[in-house]
Amino acid sequence: MYDQNNNVQDYEQSLKQARISLLNSTFDQLWVQSEKCSLIENKTSSSNSTTKIQSSWYNDIKKQFSIIFLIFIIITLLLFSLPFIIRSQYHANRYLHQCSSLACISTSYRIIENLNMNKNPCENFYSYACDGWINSHFLTPSETSISYFKEIYKNNLIILYKILQDNSNTNSISIKKLKTYFHTCMNTSNNEKLARKTLRNILQHVGKSILLFKYWSKKNFNLVTSVIYTHRHKINPFFRITITIDDKNNNYHCIYFEQSGLSFDEKFRYNDKNIRYLFNNFGTKLIKYLHSFLPEYKISKQIDEIFLFEKRLAYIFQIKTFHNPLKLYHIRTYEQIQQWFSSWFDIEIYLERIFHKDKSFFYNQTFLISTPDYFEKLKQLIEITPKYILANYITFQVIQELLPYMPENFNQFRRPLITYLKGIIEEKQLWEICAKRTDDAFGFATGALFISKVFDEKSQEKIKHIVEEIRLTFIETLPNIQWMDLETRQQAQIKAQMIIDRLGYPKWLEDERNIDRFYQDLNLSSTNNPMINIILVRRFQKEQNLKKLGQRPDIEEWTMTPIDVNAYYAPWKNMIVFPAGILQTPFFDANIPISLNFGSIASIIGRK
């Protein structure tokens, strides 16, 4: 750009000098002609007799002078306008030829294809702009929705799948692990017998429920041990515990207790008789398929008891007022937590085993509760519920959580229930399922592979420029925002100036040794059993979260991985993050004019 502007300036300077020279030459000629005219007039005035020949000559001179003057005016106008004509033509040609690349042509085609040229945009702009896209896309019987977000994510998975299919040697331990995980998932020879045996072995750790185990005993059932096992594997009956950043003290992590443990997201589902029937039918058939010793009618009765327990649990769930974070912020001490759980749950043993720390450690910790009323009422509900129902409930929570990882025959029993809830069953091919599971398990390792194919330095620079332009424009427009008072505008300006942006991927992924260290504690099974690997991954991911307790928050930590088609703003860091997954066509393309990127990805950036 700098060289191009200099060339134009040099050319204009040369034109200016030429214009001055021509003007000087023209004025010299005019002066000579005017001198001649003066001489003639003097001679004429001094002579008393003017001949016809002299008069004719004088008229010719006047005509020549007029013509020369007219030519001078025309040349002057041309000289002054020529630089502007040349410059405008130069820029016109420059920009007209800039968008002739393959990326620009394909982008133009996509835009035109999405239009409905038969509609008048002044009458119905939505139809004009969107009908083409709507007509070329349709929901298949196995889809609940369709969008560019889904299209991009599926394309990202295709890229990842091709990478995972590459069997070339690598020295990276983490890459070897994720490829083992992927190929184990793709191995369809894993039979139902192995899956059933593995699931039953897992369920032995959660109380040997009477649903599946003949010699269940109330005396032998330990609620705390069962909950510890499930929570360690990201299965959360009754409540969920995680480590999060204290919203009022960003320098520390705190222990966060949250309500959890329902099969349905909305309370009203538990009042639907059809759902109750379908839930019972699904549970009864599945438990029988898992080789329960009970007759079917007894299984049905106990599944219904699980449903009714969840219904009571749903009624004590608190509605979270997300529009007011202060209503979700309730700090409790370790002593207060002990009082809450004392009558039905040994919270001391639970915390010691979950965090592998002595109980004295927790006296100095902060406990954050979003819905304290729930835990008050949970205590009462647990106390009036028979233990065998609690054991059955935990068992069925584990089964439902792990069911998607089981062979297809295990999932057939839930189809009628899902169809009733969603209207359809979302069907996905094995390659897509396994690519997504691998990304879910090894998100940063798969992200490193992904960005090596689709995200380069040019993309990084372009998206950085867009973010900076939006930031500057936001700051420039702040003085004109009337609904903010002066102090708020000043604070908003400071915040905008200080905002941190992270684009594409975390920088530590550039060194595969960092990735190997990140996944060094994740050891997969050598038995080629996908169910065991699922459990090991879930345990690893939970430990990754729990070990943050006692550590200072890492400002460079990402809560999304590079393949994610999403973005987020972290308030405590004042940071916006845009993974490489969302910086893909049609949201972003480093090879097209920046104006098009401002019309797409910039809208997402501006929102964040």
Image: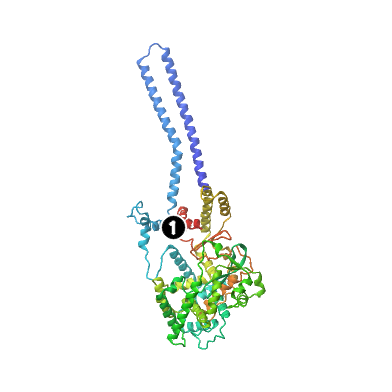
| Relative image position of residue 438 (x, y in whole percent) | 50, 72
Residue 528 in view (yes/no): no
Residue at figure coordinates x 37%, y 65% from the top left: 138
- Element on which disc 1 rests: helix
Q: Is 482 located above or below residue 75 in the figure? A: below
Q: Is 152 displayed left or right of 238 in the figure? A: left
| Relative image position of residue 213 (x, y in whole percent) | 50, 86
Residue at figure coordinates x 45%, y 57% from the top left: 600
Q: Is 64 located above or below residue 96 in the figure? A: above
Q: Residue lying farthest top? A: 48
| Relative image position of residue 379 (x, y in whole percent) | 56, 75
**Quarter of the image holding residue 329?**
bottom right
Q: Is 572 displayed left or right of 599 in the figure? A: right
Q: Is 310 located above or below residue 57 in the figure? A: below
| Relative image position of residue 454 (x, y in whole percent) | 49, 63
For the rendered model, the colour scheme is rainbow
Q: Residue lying farthest right? A: 360
Which residue position holds label 1?
Answer: 103
Number of dots carrying numbers: 1
Q: Is 37 located above or below residue 26 in the figure? A: above
Q: Residue lying farthest left? A: 118
Q: Residues within 10 Å of mark 1 (few under 14, many from 20)?
A: some
Who is closer to the viewer here, 129 or 4?
129
Give the amino acid at mark 1: Ala
Residue 474 in view (yes/no): yes
Q: Is 500 displayed left or right of 277 in the figure? A: right
